[in-house]
Amino acid sequence: MCLHTDKDGTPDKVTDTLVTSSFSETGSSQSVMYTSTNSDVVQAAKAPCSEIPLHFSAHYKDYAYLPSWRKAPENKLISLVDQKDYLEVVYERSSSEGSSPSHQVCHYSYDWLRDICRCDECFNTVTHNKQTAISLHPQRPKSIGISEDGDFVEISWDGGHDSRYPKSVLLAEYLLAKDPRENDPVIDAQRQLWGSDLPESSFRKYEFDSLITDDHSLFDWLMDLRKTGLTVVKNAPRKLGQVTELCNRVAYPRIICWGPTFQVGVKENASHVAYSNLPLSMHTDSAFYMFPPGVQVLHCIKQASSGGQTHVADGFRAAEKIRQADPECFDLLTKTEWEYFDMGDDYIGPHHLQARHPVIRLDSRGRLRQIVYNDLNRGWRQDNATSTSPAAYKALRKYSEYLNAEDSMLKYTLKEGDIIVIDNFRVLHGRSKVDSASARLMEGAFMDWDEICSKLRSLGKALFS
């Protein structure tokens, strides 16, 4: 989009990752977006997120979404230079920045500048949508200039179209490109890795009534879930329907083959292992969906007289340890797709769900995006030859070993009225064997991350802008 240089022409470093990891076990030369667990997570967990200066976007005169927390420095526009494919903008640094050199040079692609034009012809300020196709955009300017008041860059394009760009918008884009976290602090929230060294007394817990009635608490809870992937809500009424109320506070439950909610208890001749008293191995839920739900919400209404302890593990931490220890194994886990399926007759009637996923899914920057792992629903058919190779199975076993290692697994006994909320793209969960004579009853639901992130942005703007 844009390249930033100082006066001497040396490019500023544009960070492609969120933060360089201080988690020693990741080790590799590739930076990742995590910080270490141990005391880091514990300390971060003790401070309410709403007391931390988070960075949410405010709509700037229907021009662009800018970070409301950071005002662009009052740099003076000095000159514009047409550099064929991009516009060179030279600013005089403000005295408040206290840095040298005194001039700052930024390069902006003409394609990008034309694409972000917010005139009435190009952009609908009511619907917040673009109104022109990029194929119709001229790529070359006819003239460039600075407005009389010095606050706007003005461009006349081939074909007679005129655009104006507030210098504050261009400066803000410069700041955002230097630290991509500020572009979308929800999607790019700094994740905190954890293992069994995070005792159950240390990760944050939230009161159910507070989440239902207080927006600050709701924001803190959702942001904490985004960062750590695991939260516990306390003192929910011990009756059915509370997961629905909690999901509706955010958006709505994700309906899957079992319905908008589902109940888990010990049944004789259970048709699914979840309804038996058998232990459950570590897994992510609904791997048999092409788009698995992002978050699981599980309410303990009646706890077992014995057994049924919840086990959780940070799948991102296990993946980063493998990335460091065995890059070839890590590569196989990102490229080998395994098949998952589920068949039955439930809320939607007869169903046969089937999907393929790699265990580890990365984003375009090589950062961890999603873990999909479930031996319970893993099939035998694969979509490429490597899936049946010994190396692919070795990689799968190694990931399982890391998940089940003593330093990875956190064990937690849910109390009646507890709701455990899990990032299903990251945290794997299981349970110990349940007393077969128990009247254990859990109610569960799912949500999607799109709705959660939308709620976080809306709350962030309302609370902090």
Image: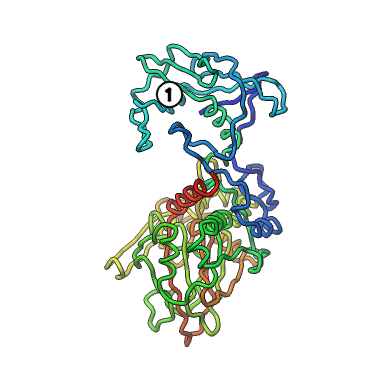
Q: Amino acid at mark 1?
A: Arg
Tell me which colouring the rendered structure shows.
Answer: rainbow
- x, y percentage for residue 85? 49, 18
The one of 171 and 385 positioned closer to us in this rendering: 171
The quadrant holding residue 239 is bottom left
* Residue lying at the far front of the rendered structure: 149
Mark 1, secondary structure of its residue: helix
Q: Tell me residue 102's x, y (percent).
A: 69, 20
Question: What's the residue at 47%, 48% (across, down)?
Answer: 458
The structure residue drawn at horizontal position 31% and vertical position 63%, both measured from the top left corner, is 352
Residue 135 lies in what quarter of the image? top left
Looking at the image, the residue that sits furthest to the bottom is 437
Q: Is residue 394 in sight in this rendering? A: no
Question: How many labels sit on residues?
Answer: 1
| 89 shown above or below 168 | above
In-image side of 408 versus 371 (left or right): right
**Which residue corresponds to the image point at 44% horizontal and 60% vertical from the top-left?**
249
Which of the pair 85/451 is nearer the observer? 451
Does residue 295 show up?
yes
Q: Which residue is mark 1?
A: 114
Q: Residues within 10 Å of mark 1 (few under 14, many from 20)?
A: many
- Single out the residue that lies furthest toward the top: 143
Q: Residue 436, how many percent across, how many down? A: 48, 85
From the top left corner, tell me how far across and down residue 302 is, in percent: 48, 80
In screen coordinates, is 286 left or right of 419? left
* Residue at image location 60% in from the left, 57% down from the top: 318
Using the image as rendered, state which of residue 387 and residue 86 is in the foreground: 86
